[in-house]
Image (cartoon, helix red, strand yellow):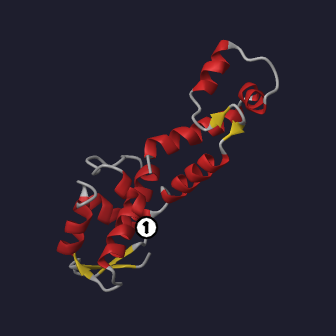
Amino acid sequence: MALTTAVARARQAVAVLASPTLRAAVVGDGELDDRTRAALAAFDWLGDDGPDTPLLGRTAQDLQRLQAPAALLEFDWIARMPVRDVERHPISVRIVALVFARLGSPRPVSEAVLNAAIAMFAEDVAIVRRDAVDLGVLERTDDGGSYRYVG
């Protein structure tokens, strides 16, 4: 999956839905100004016969895969987590879900093992682990020595 291509196509489709001028151009109604014609020329999913339905279907599948925890594999290692909770929390939850899916067991893991696994995805291991505990995704033993995934 080409992440940037799928996201760009999705943005283009949303632009068509949001813009009466683009919508009319895709349907084939009305005159096209130079700006609209240039925008449509960039749409690789739009041919002379209209939208390429199979291509848009594959794009929709790619976007659905981006919502899964494994989508983190599509991105580079995260050197800097977002500061805002609303942006950081979903990333932390996905990282922890992917880590425990790879560990393949609901058994508790030591903090050292968890830290090493999280470090494969993000530099700030502590914030990812802390977010997951605060959000109820991980349970920590009283001594902080091990963690259990509760999803």
- How many numbered discs, if any? 1
Front in this rendered view, residue 76 or 43: 43
Percent coordinates x, y for residue 66 in the rendering: 48, 55
Going 22% across and 80% down the picture, which residue do you hit? 143
Q: Is residue 147 left or right of residue 44?
A: left
Front in this rendered view, residue 18 or 35: 35
Percent coordinates x, y for residue 150 in the rendering: 42, 79
Front in this rendered view, residue 106 or 49: 49
Percent coordinates x, y for residue 145 in the rendering: 20, 79
Q: Amino acid at mark 1?
A: Leu
Classify 118 as above or below 122.
Answer: below
- The residue that disc 1 covers is 135
Q: Is residue 115 left or right of residue 30?
A: left
Classify 6 as above or below 31.
Answer: below
Question: Which residue, as the protein is rendered here, is positioned at the far left?
Answer: 112
Going 78% across and 33% down the picture, which residue do you hit? 27
Question: Which residue, as the protein is rendered here, is positioned at the far right?
Answer: 29
Going 29% across and 84% down the picture, which residue do you hit? 108
> Mark 1: few, some, or many residues within 10 Å (few <14, many ≥20)?
some
Say which quarter of the image contains residue 24: top right
As helix, strand or loop, the secondary structure at mark 1 comes to loop
Q: Is residue 122 left or right of residue 29?
A: left
Please identify the quadrant where the C terminus is shown: bottom left
